[in-house]
Amino acid sequence: MRTVYAAGLGIGDDHPPRIMGVLNVSEESPYKPSVFDDPADAAAYVDRELIDQGADIVDVGLESANKRFDVLSAEQELDRLDTAIESIASVSGDAVFSIETRYHEVAKKALQNGFDMVNDICGFADPQMPEVCKEYDVAVAKMASPPDLARPGAVEDVDDIYEALKMNGLTDKTIVDPAFGGWSAEKTLEDDRETFHRLREFRGLGQPILVSINRKNFLRDVAGRSTEAALPVSLAATSMAVERGAHVIRTHDVAETRDAALIGKAFSRRRVRDDELGISELDVTTRGDAKRHLERVGGDTNHADKAVTRVVELRKLSESEHTALTTAAGNAGAIITGEIGATLVIGTHGAFEQIAQAIPPEFDRLTAVFVELSEL
């Protein structure tokens, strides 16, 4: 996993989770407490509600990303940028300032006037964006999007999100964002939940991960909460996201989110590292995780079937079922141990697939269990 430095701020596995607070200079933004058109008021808000509460990064938005509003042109964003520039110049606290834009012209002017990094919500749909970021040697968050400046985040399927993040390449200082939220009419809550389930897969890109999940619908819907009452579900998801590999959390609830992120980091699984030898144990818990890393290094993705070992307990096998399973597991290279009533089977996805194929047809329910295990 590459470490990215944003104006000296380390982002990656070797650093604490970073909190990205939000300031908007767009009157259309739905979160009104973060919206300002007066630079002095904006600066006071950034100091008091973001930096003093633990924000490492302040992301400044020039327009609402809500799909109900018309997309601003680069010229319209540039008109608003002056307010953003004046606002951050008046901030007394220390933070990395990020400009949220889809246009390279806006990014360039912002970087020339005090901003430290870019948050590209259209994922390099403007092909000159990565070149500007390389020219100024800055970190850039790249949100998964189609190659269309008018449709940020409009990607639904997890595999398509992954491919969208690869579109137009990655700079050495790219932070990837899998685009949670209702960016398109086609995107469902279940799409977001599936992306969250498979968040570890995005580590296969080898770059730090940013998530923006604060009070999002796919979380609120689980608990039946309104936006106003959704802080607890956001914090629970924040801890889970960090444990699954997220490095930057974008939020309006800075202090609470910081605490939740630190808990997620503290209780993440310990992995073996040796920097001198260049050894890193990868965070792989599913066959999909393994496949992404194999793709990254040019390996044979068929080996993903052997990458993850699972342990299954079976307590109600008949003697004939136990005998059939023992034979099938042995032939598949899996471990079967214990007695009837307390049997453990230990094996890879590939081994479970072979077991499912070898169990005699009269034990169809047992076969179905191992088919399901081989597909997870």
Image: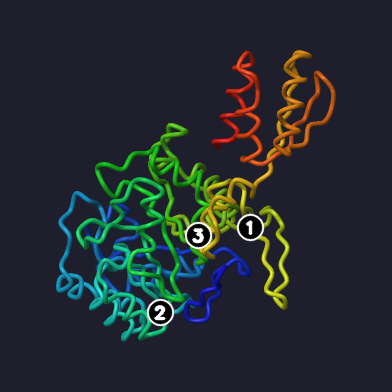
> What type is the residue that disc 3 sits on?
Glu
Residue 331 appears in which quarter of the rendering? top right
User: Relative to 86, is 359 on the left or the right?
Assistant: right
- Which marked residue is nearer to the observer: mark 2 or mark 3? 3
**In front of the other: 88 or 117:** 117
> What type is the residue that disc 1 sits on?
Lys
Determine the secondary structure under disc 3. helix
Residue 354 appears in which quarter of the rendering? top right
User: Relative to 251, is 122 on the left or the right?
Assistant: left
Residue at numbered disc 3: 295
Disc 2 and disc 3 in contact, CB within 8 angstroms? no
Determine the secondary structure under disc 2. loop
| Among numbered discs 3 and 1, the one appearing first in the sequence | 1
Spatial CA span between label 3 and label 1: 27 Å
Residue at the spot x=60%, y=53% of the render? Answer: 243
Please tell me how many numbered marks the rendered image carries.
3
**In front of the other: 330 or 79:** 330
User: Relative to 238, is 312 on the left or the right?
Assistant: right
User: Relative to 246, is 106 on the left or the right?
Assistant: left
Is disc 2 surrounded by few (<14), some (14 to 19) or many (20+) residues within 10 Å? Answer: many
Is disc 1 surrounded by few (<14), some (14 to 19) or many (20+) residues within 10 Å? Answer: many
Q: Position of residue 101 (x, y in %)?
A: 28, 68
What colour-coding does the image apply?
rainbow
**In front of the other: 360 or 121:** 360
Q: Position of residue 302 (x, y in %)?
A: 55, 50
Disc 3 and disc 1 in contact, CB within 8 angstroms? no
Determine the secondary structure under disc 1. helix
Q: Residue 116, labelled with which disc?
A: 2
